Image: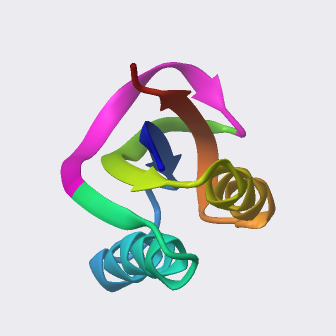
Amino acid sequence: MRDYETMYILRPDLEEEAVEAAITRFQELIAEEGGTVTNVNKWGRRRLAYEIEGYGEGVYVIMEFSAEARVARELERVFRITDEVIRYLMIKKD
């Protein structure tokens, strides 16, 4: 298993329940595939450096997890097709 860190930005017009549901969905995806989430840090609403998809703000979430490479690829695929996510970045930690 490898250690990963991902930062994703959710749309700012989401209700708090929708934000929590999205965070939980991503954590469950990792757990179902055999990975473990070690830390979730919700930064909350922040101003973006530039507009993304017409949004000037976003809800930032940083998540650290351990999983196989296939799980990280699946999580990236889900980020791409999820309407709530406007931007994401995933890195493999040393």
Does residue 57 belong to the magenta stretch?
no
Counting from the top left corner in percent of width and height, residue 75 is at: 64, 59
Write down the quadrant of residue 54 in the picture.
Answer: top right
Q: Is residue 74 left or right of residue 59?
A: right
Q: In which quarter of the image is the C terminus?
A: top left
**Residue in front for this viewpoint, 3 or 39:** 3
**Residue in front for this viewpoint, 24 or 53:** 24
Write down the quadrant of residue 77 in the picture.
Answer: bottom right
Q: Furthest residue to the top?
A: 49
Looking at the picture, the colour scheme in use is: rainbow
Dominant SS of magenta comes to strand
Counting from the top left corner in percent of width and height, residue 74 is at: 73, 61
Is 29 situated above or below 36?
below
Q: Furthest residue to the front?
A: 1
Residue at screen point 60% across, 26% down: 51
- Number of numbered labels in the structure image: 0
**Residue in front for this viewpoint, 68 or 31:** 68
Q: In this view, does 44 lie to the left or right of 73?
A: left
Residue at screen point 50% across, 75% down: 34
Counting from the top left corner in percent of width and height, residue 14 is at: 45, 70
Is 3 situated above or below 63?
above
Residue at screen point 41% across, 25% down: 93
Give the extent of the magenta segment: 39-53
Write down the quadrant of residue 68 in the picture.
Answer: bottom right
Does residue 49 belong to the magenta stretch?
yes
Is 68 situated above or below 48?
below
**Residue in front for this viewpoint, 56 or 73:** 73
